[in-house]
Amino acid sequence: MDETEKTVSCRCCIVGGGPAGMMLGFLLARAGVDTLVLEKHGDFFRDFRGDTIHPSTMEAMYELGLLKEFLKLPHQETRILKAWIGDTLLPVADFSYLPVQAKFLAFMPQWDFLDFLASQAKLYPSFRLNMSTQANGLIWESGKVAGVTAAAPGGQVIVRADLTIGADGRGSLIRQEAGLRPQEIGAPMDVLWFRLPWKEGDDEESFGRIDRGQILVLINRGTYWQCGYVIPKGTAEQIKADGIAALQQRVTAAAPQFAGRMAGLNSFDEVSLLTVAVDRLALWHKPGLLCIGDAAHAMSPIGGVGINLAIQDAIAAANTLAEPLSGGSPATNELLAEVQKRREWPTKVIQGIQVAIQKRVITRVLASTSKAAPNWFLRLFLRYPYLRRLPAALIGLGIRREHLLSPERPSSRAGSAN
């Protein structure tokens, strides 16, 4: 063995410190499971990530007794999701009727969310988080995954684990190494993310604008607007070649009230590209390995539900796996299959809805040069406000919402009596 190589062991090794990985790591450690999370970055600070925290996620925080503390973090609240379609302001979803504690969408920087989960997980001695540690291979023994190899600041690390979780996102190395190939479902668009200044008198809540072939999402971040400009798939290089002035003109056409703020967007160095992908694995697991979150299913940004699905996967996995892992029993292939069975159907339903919206709305809008206006169906949301509760439930709660069933071991928390 190389002198810079070391071996560590754990019951569960989670590769990826995103929402799915951190939530599962927290819940397993809370149940007394020896858990190690590997995160390749040195911190959680990555701008222009999904920042939408849904009511179902906040309900999970409530079930954990953490909602009040969680909502002390900087965030903006949206109770009615609205969009300008041409000259019509359309209320699309009203979250105020949901049967949960937090009846709103919370827009919160993802790094704050992940830091919060990490701080809670670190209260349990069975939790370890190794930052700047990038998994680079799987360990196989007798046809079963027995851990991972990883590059860390001190050299190569061998992590031996009874169960390995692939939570390393849509470009998952873990699923690739396991020979798990996603089915590409496809998306007709990509998104350019950038910031524009926020000014006194601006709308307090986040919203969207659709008109004349343009789709612009505006998220109020308190001191600035985080903007998502939707473009046809594969056109980012051409837009960049056209120059920043052309993009400024496009944004101004979509949102004329920002015409005087384009100085806040003066270089493509200030623009991030989100390459949209929609896919899912046919099989989420192999002996000793389970994929969750984006590693199992990449979601379209429509509805901002990716984080919600990832958190629900983590809760379902903890509900199924915490007891056997904490008691020394194996995480059998049958148990891993239960997690997939629990979460696969909701994933398919949500992706099906997203794909339908992509085909029937996004593609048509991006190809249009005409003035936009709500069709007859959308106008029903203006006439009958109770209809807004349906998309609110779908976006805010999702399909087959998970409730916390995994236990907190009385002796698992730091400072608890043995």
Image (tube, rainbow, N blue to C red):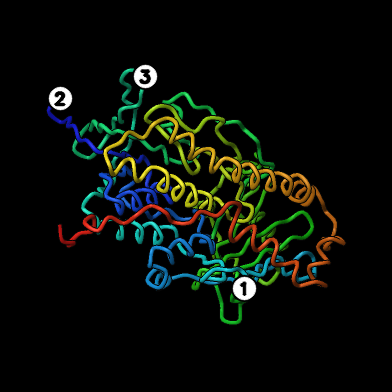
Q: Residue furthest top?
A: 142
Q: Which amino acid type corresponds to the residue marked 2 in the rendered image?
A: Asp
SS under mark 3: loop
Instruction: Name the outermost residue toward the right.
Output: 376
Residue shown at the point (42%, 30%) measured from the top left: 333
Point out residue 375 in the picture as x, y percentages from the top left corner.
Answer: 85, 60
In primary-sequence order, the first of circles 1 and 3 is 1
Which circle, 3 or 2, is nearer the viewer?
3
Name the residue rendered at 28%, 42% in the picture. 327
Q: Secondary structure at mark 2?
A: loop
Q: Is residue 355 left or right of residue 20?
A: right
Q: Is residue 315 rendered to the left or right of residue 209?
A: left
Earlier along the polypeptide chain: callout 2 or callout 1? 2
The residue tagged 3 is 143
Distance from the alpha carbon under mark 1 to that under mark 3:
50 Å
Above or below residue 24? Residue 387 is below
Residue 324 occupies quadrant: top left
Spot the residue most to the bottom.
201
Mark 3, Cα crowd under 10 Å, few <14 / some 14-19 / many 20+, is few
- Per the rendering, the mark at residue 2 is 2
Q: Which mark is residue 96?
A: 1
Residue 216's quadrant in the figure? bottom right
Compared across the picture, whether 373 is left or right of 175 comes to right
- For badge 1, the amino acid type reads Ser
Instruction: Tell me where residue 66 appears, x and y as whole percent.
Output: 38, 67
Residue 345 position, x and y percent, is: 61, 42
Quadrant, the C terminus: bottom left
Residue depth check, mark 2 versus mark 1: number of the one nearer the observer: 1
- Residue drawn at x 61%, y 64% is 218
Name the foreground residue: 170 vs 272: 170
